[in-house]
Amino acid sequence: MTSIDVSDLTKEYGARRAVDRLTFSVRPGRVTGFLGPNGAGKSTTMRLVLGLDRPTSGTATLGGRPYAGFHEPLRRVGALLDAGAAHGFRTGRDHLRALAVSNRIPDRRIDAVLEETGLASVARHRVRSYSLGMRQRLGIAAALLGDPEVIMLDEPSNGLDPAGIVWIRELLRRLAAQGRTVLVSSHLMNETATFADHLVVLGRGRLLADTPVKEFIHARVRPHVRIRTTDSPALAGLLSSRGYDGVPDEDGAWTVRHASAEDIGRLMSEAGVPVLELTSREGTLEQAYLDLTSGEAEYTAPLKES
């Protein structure tokens, strides 16, 4: 199957460097989340991969070939960059048919992707009558039209309702399970955590991380444990004697950072300290992402304490 390979990729717009010597690969068989603050270079990188812009230096290839080298590119690469790209006066089916004819894709694929994206019932309606979520589904249908090995989607959940978000999540997982190469750009950290296996994170055009999701979270956000007991003095003494930093909460529970529920539970059992509650709180992708990118955003507003 085809991989996406970016090597020493740089793109400059006058004095501004949007992509800065970027190198990473997107492998088949997994969903790769493409993350970064606004202005990080994600959309520019995707455009460079798809041949919609020329790099200042470096290369972006698909299976070792540039996108422009494919005779019928929709059969190899499917992409959604802008849900508003479809002509408003065409029907959804006609939009897909124009793409299909240009790449010698049979009509049966049009019907298949309309069904898969839930647009079969509105296929003969004009695109201008579509909601944002419907346009998003049409863009995804276009990306799937050629049954490609590589799928690149920019903010595919944008405009989708909760059922649509569950649908796109399951679709991405299924595509990866089929051995396809799937790259998904998103600003929704918690949603990305539900479907991504691997992450590529950018900041100011530079590569900040290229790692599995779980490793990314565990490297930046340590887990903590919430404990409730009837003998707080005994718990405080036990934690202090074992080098744990336990902090009492306002509701009477305790929070122990940088600890696992298994370790704390074993210590309390051995010491005979009563346990009313023992809950593990794992770090989230959002916490890890904010920790990494806090100094990399081009546009920021101060966060107010609640």
Image: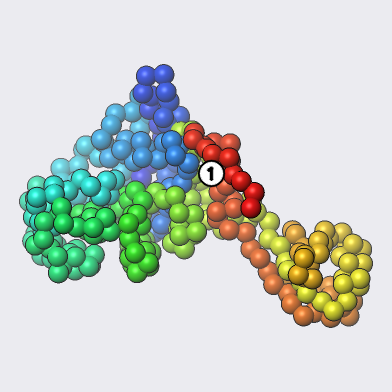
Indicate left or right for 95 with 291 as reference. Answer: left
Looking at this view, is 88 or 52 the one in front? 88
Labels in figure, total:
1
Give above or below for 9 relative to 224: above
Q: Looking at the rendering, which quadrant does residue 105 occupy?
A: bottom left
Residue at 73% from the left image edge and 74% from the top image edge: 278
Residue at 36% from the left image edge and 57% from the top image edge: 157
Looking at this view, is 34 or 227 the one in front? 227
What residue would you read off at disc 1?
209
Residue 32 appears anywhere in the view: yes
Give above or below for 302 relative to 16: below
Residue at 45% from the left image edge and 57% from the top image edge: 192
Looking at this view, is 140 or 63 the one in front? 140
Indicate left or right for 253 with 4 as reference. Answer: right
Classify mark 1: helix, strand or loop: strand
Measuring from the top left, give residue 62's x and y in whole percent: 31, 43
Query: Which quadrant is home to the N terminus?
Result: bottom left
Residue type at mark 1?
Answer: Ala
